[in-house]
Structures are given as C-alpha cells and as structure tokens.
Image (spheres, rainbow, N blue to C red):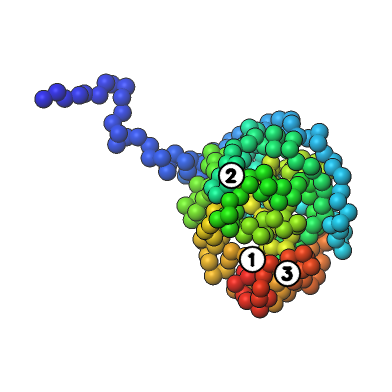
Amino acid sequence: MWIRKNRGWELKDSALTPEHVFRNRRRFLMGAAGAAFAPMLLACEKKAAAESDMTPDPSAGLYPVKRNEKYTIDRDLTAEGDATTYNNYYEFGTSKDISAAAQALPIRPWAITIDGLVDKPQTIDFDDLLKQMALEERNYRHRCVEAWSMAVPWSGFPLADLVKLAQPQSGAKFLRFESFMNAEVAPGQDDPIYPWPYIEGLTLAEATNELAFVVTGIYGKALPKQNGAPFRIALPWKYGFKSAKGIQRITFTDEQPVGLWQALQSSEYGFYANVNPAFSHPRWSQESERVLGSGERVPTQLFNGYGEYVAGLYPDLNDRNFFY
C-alpha cells in the first residue's frame, strides 16, 4: 500500500482554519484581540473607505437631472447631511451610523442580471443601463417602519421602464430583487442570524405603477454607497425596508418572493408592507412619525399620502395583510 507523507511545509486538513472562522476574523480581532488590535483595524477600514470614496464615479457627470414637477411633497426636503448619514443598511451594521463603513463597497464594475420569466434575460452593466434610460428627479416622502421619515429628491427612472426592457412573459406575477453579497466588505453579512443576501419583492402591478422608481442619484448627485449605490428602488407608499439597496439581480417569477425581514420575522414584516397608521407594528404604533432632522412628530398618512396613485392595487383596505 502506498502511503503519502506530508512534506514539512504542508498542513493536515484538520489544521486548516474553518471558513466561518476566516470570515469572522474582523469580529475576532475586535473581540479577542481587544484594545490592542481594534484601533489598527478601524484605522485600516477608515483608510480603505477613504481611498474607495476617492474613486471617481463614472456616472457623476449625469447629475443633476431635470425635476419631474408632478411629484411634489407637502413638507421641506430633509437636509442632505441628515439623509446621507442616518441610514439603515444591515449589511454594514445594525446602527444608523454606517455611512463610513459602507464606503468599502466596490460599485464598479456593477452589473444587474435580469432573469426568470422574461423574453429578454440579460446581464447588463450598470453604466450601459443608464445610457438607455431617461433620468429625472422626483421628490418623494420616505417612511421607515421604525416610525421615522424623511423627504428626499431621488434621481433615476421609472421601474416600469426596466420591466419593459425585460419583456416579462404572461406567467410573470412578481419581481424578486436580490442585493449584493460580499461579506469581505460588508461585515454584517457574516452574521448568521440574517438570511443573506437581502431579498425583497413586488407584484408586477406594483412594479409597473408610476410611483415605483429605480434610484441612481440623490440631491443632484450620484447615489452615495450608504444610500444604496449604485442601484436601488424607491417605493414611497411602502415602508422603507421594501426599497432594496445595492441590487444585482431581478428575477421575474410566478411565486411570491419572501423578503429577508419577512423570512426573519413574518409576524412583524409582511410582503406588502404598505403604510397605514391604523395598523400598528406589534411593538410600536404607526399613527405618527418622527421627521428626520427636525425631530417633529407628524401624523402618518395612509399609503404615506400616495393613495391616489396606489389604492386601487389593494382590494381591501381593512385587510391587515396589505399593511405590515
């Protein structure tokens, strides 16, 4: 019998670092190494974020774009500094202060795959997609399920234009959005509690509603990474978690997608998640909201004030299934 002996420089398989340990090395350094390594690690991450932030965005010259005056709001716009530094983006951490950490995400090259029940499946470079779309600016209200809100000038194009590009087949009933997966730069994706990557979904009727908007810019500039660059959606009549960020795949399907938050806690986060002050979250009221920046509390409106555009999509306004 031939017996293979390892050379002196070779390691046994049992000595290899398990993959989950390797991927959790940031957490190990912050915890086990403690104060000795934490400052160095943070300094390296800040340096990487700064260098990444200095990389020119090839789409920067497209902005600002012309505002579509049809979409006006009854409140002042949120200050840019507030809207771009107070962010939910669990891929980069559970606090709202993730804007620096998000700079580590590489957004070029970036491609969007369109597949499923479509006549034109394709993978298209983000910048090539921009060349095919007519960009405009829309002022939208944004209501978080956590009962805070802001008013934002988004730049982008109607989601309906992207649906048209894909040419969905007759069996397509839903769109499934899948965000990036890159735990090397998004340490939150190392957390096994969450079913990564981030998934969200819409009905085809919702996706082709005139309010559904693909966002590529904000405040007359290319979209910052912490706000979902380079490609996210905005659905102003729904709670904010429905507006997926950092999207890389859109699948047309005949099955209702299960979003990340729905998969994590279906009793609190449903598929439709339309804004309705009459239906409280299990752990807090939705009757009012805190306006980001001013701190003022104002009454929450049904469909976040966009009922004239979307109420017809939902047959029973008393059915809680449409409002959580």
Task: Inspect the image, locate mark 3, and give the three-letter code of the amino acid beneath it.
Answer: Ala
Q: Report the residue at 80% width, 54% height from top.
A: 152
Relative image position of residue 106 (x, y in whole percent) = 63, 35
Q: Which mark is residue 273?
A: 1
Q: Which residue is disc 2 drawn over?
A: 119
Residue 20 vs residue 292: left or right?
left
Residue 3 visible in image: yes
Q: Which residue is disc 3 drawn over?
A: 311
Check whether the beta carbons of the residues at disc 1 and disc 2 lie within 8 A of each other.
no
Asked if residue 214 is positioned above or below residue 316 in the image, the reply reads: above
Compare marks 3 and 1 and give the one earlier in the sequence: 1
Q: Quadrant of residue 133?
A: top right
Q: Secondary structure at mark 1?
A: loop
Distance Cα–Cα, label 3 vs label 1? 13 Å
Q: Quadrant of the C terminus?
A: bottom right
Distance Cα–Cα, label 2 vs label 3? 30 Å
Q: Report the residue at 84% width, 57% height from top.
A: 71
Packing grade of label 2 (10 A; few <14, some 14-19, many >=20) is: few
Relative image position of residue 193 (x, y in whole percent) = 48, 56
**Which numbered disc, 2 or 3, marks the residue closer to the eye?**
2
Q: Quadrant of residue 204?
A: bottom right
Task: Inspect the image, locate mark 2, and give the three-letter code of the amino acid beneath it.
Answer: Asp
**Which numbered disc, 1 or 2, marks the residue closer to the eye?**
2
Packing grade of label 3 (10 A; few <14, some 14-19, many >=20) is: some
Asked if residue 277 is positioned above or below residue 187 in the image, the reply reads: below
Compare marks 1 and 2 and give the one earlier in the sequence: 2
